[in-house]
Every structure is written in structure tokens, then in C-alpha cells.
Image (spheres, rainbow, N blue to C red):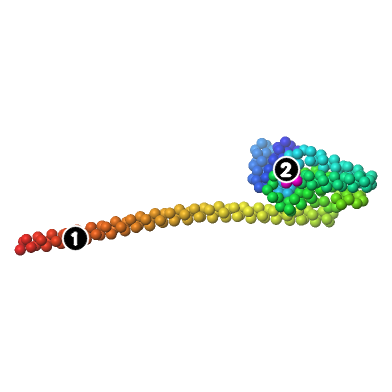
Amino acid sequence: MSDLLADATAELYTADPDGFTTRRTELATAARDAGEPAVAKQITALRKPTRSAWVVNRLVRSDPEVRSRIDALAADLREAATAADGTSIRELTAARSRLVDELTRSALRGLPAPPAAMREEVTATLDAAIADPEVAASLGSLARAAQYAGFGLAPLSGGPPAPAPAAKKTPNRTLAEIEAEREDRRREKIEEAERSLAQADQDVEATTAAERDLEDAVRSLEADLADARQRLAEARRQSYRAESRQQRAAQQLSRLRE
């Protein structure tokens, strides 16, 4: 991976996903301007993470020990499963539960009242990283939450280990992916609706301000009209008085001429 792509990936999957799309475009443009069109294409192909995936990515990138702790426990579990060591499997299963709980709390730390669904997805993703090397390898650049399909390593409840199958697509895995994709699309629709609401709020604020300005203008014009009407009334009174004086003067002149 080139330095430009690595830096862009680190930034995009650590920063808040609300600004992902805009920043991805900026970074791709910068790579293209730097004479790296292939890297720009790779940056453009990076998928926006769900918020659950984002908190896991942020945890892994902020604490390098997270990945090594997950890998070490996964290796111990595989070794115990291969040896069919029931005692070690039970102990490591308990350690697995404690590690997942600890990392989940760390991932959600600092978030104001994270929803239960997010907590469940973060827990499932960290557990899947222990069970599935492919998920573990994608930590730090996850686009969506992962889910353990129940194959390979022993489940959290303990029990005899199942033989590790060759990597392949399974119906459960495919269903999990479909559900995750649906959740991703739902989140994108929510974000689109939130953007539409924000734009509508701005439009309402702008039209309300325009309405207030026009109301002020109308009140000012009404005040000017009322003042003009008062001056008109006063002018009419002055005109009436002048006409009265004119009539009296004409009558007096007429009498003097008789």
C-alpha cells in the first residue's frame, strides 16, 4: 500500500464518518494532482463506515495493542482447539469474553449514550475478529460491523471445539452480510434524511428571516403612511383656514367698494 493510500485510509477510517464522503473526494483529488491516478481510484473506492464500524476502527488505530491482544488470544484458542484441551478452551473462552467486554467499553468511551444496537454490533465485531482471521485483518478499515457465523473457534458458551473448515462462503455468513448491507443502506438513508432535514431547517430559517424583514418593511411603510395622512389632514385644515380668510377678505373689500 502506498503512503498516500495508507495515510488516506487511516484518516478516513479514524475521523467521524459524517465528513467521510467530502474528505474522501478531497484526498482522491490530492492524489490525482500528485500524479497518482491509481491511488486516487483506490481512495475513491473506500467505503464509508457505519458508526459501529467506525468506533472499532478508531479503537484499533488509537491503540496498537488491541490488534496484538486479539491475535494472541485467537492463536491460543486455535492451539487449544487443535489439542482438544478442554480445560484450556474453557479458560480461554472466559478470557475471550472478558477481552471483548473490555474492548467494547474502550471503543464506546466518550460517546454520549451510545445506543444498545451499536454496543451489540461493536461486541459482535470484536468477537468475530477473534474467530475469523479475515475480520481481524480488516480491523482499522471496516466499512460495516462483522458477525461471527459460528464456525471455527469455540463459541463463547464453551463446549467441544469444531474443526476449522476451509475458508468459504456459508449460508449463515451470506445472510449476515446481507443483513449488514441492509443496515448500511438504512444508515445511508437516515443520513440522507438528516441532510434533507438540515436543508429544510435552513430554508425555513431563511424564509422566516425574509418574512421578518418584509414585516418590518411593511410596518415602516405603514408608519410613513400614517405620518403622511396626518400631514395631509393638517394641510387640509390649513387650506380650509386660508380659504376662509380669503372669503372674509373678499367680502370686506366688496363692502368697502359700495
Q: Residue at x 78, y 44 (%)?
A: 103
At x 75%, y 44%, the residue is 106
Look at 38% across and 57% down and name the residue there. 222
Q: Is residue 18 left or right of residue 146?
A: left
Look at the magenta stretch and give its main secondary structure.
helix
Q: Which residues are magenta?
A: 105-109
Quadrant of the drawing holding the C terminus:
bottom left
Q: Is residue 106 magenta?
A: yes
Say left or right for 200 vs 155.
Answer: left
Asked if labels 2 and 1 touch by Cβ distance under 8 angstroms, the answer is: no
Q: Earlier in the sequence, mark 1 or mark 2?
A: 2
Marks 1 and 2, how far apart at CA: 91 Å
Secondary element type, mark 2: helix
> How far across and down, in percent of the image, does residue 128 sit?
81, 48
Horizontal and vertical percent position of residue 116: 73, 53
Going by the numbered disc 1, the residue's amino acid type is Glu
Is residue 57 in view from this perspective? Answer: no
Query: Which dot marks residue 243?
Result: 1
Magenta segment: does it hold 126? no
| Helix, strand or loop for disc 1 | helix
Front-lying residue, 66 or 39 = 66
Quarter of the image with the N terminus is top right
Residue on which the image places disc 2: 58
| Near-viewer residue (61 or 171) | 61
The percent coordinates of residue 75 (x first, y second) are 87, 42
What amino acid is found at the position of numbered circle 2 in the picture? Arg
Task: Give the residue drawn at x 83%, y 47%.
Answer: 97
Q: Position of residue 159 (x, y in %)?
A: 91, 51
The number of callouts visible is: 2
Q: Residues within 10 Å of mark 2 (few under 14, many from 20)?
A: many
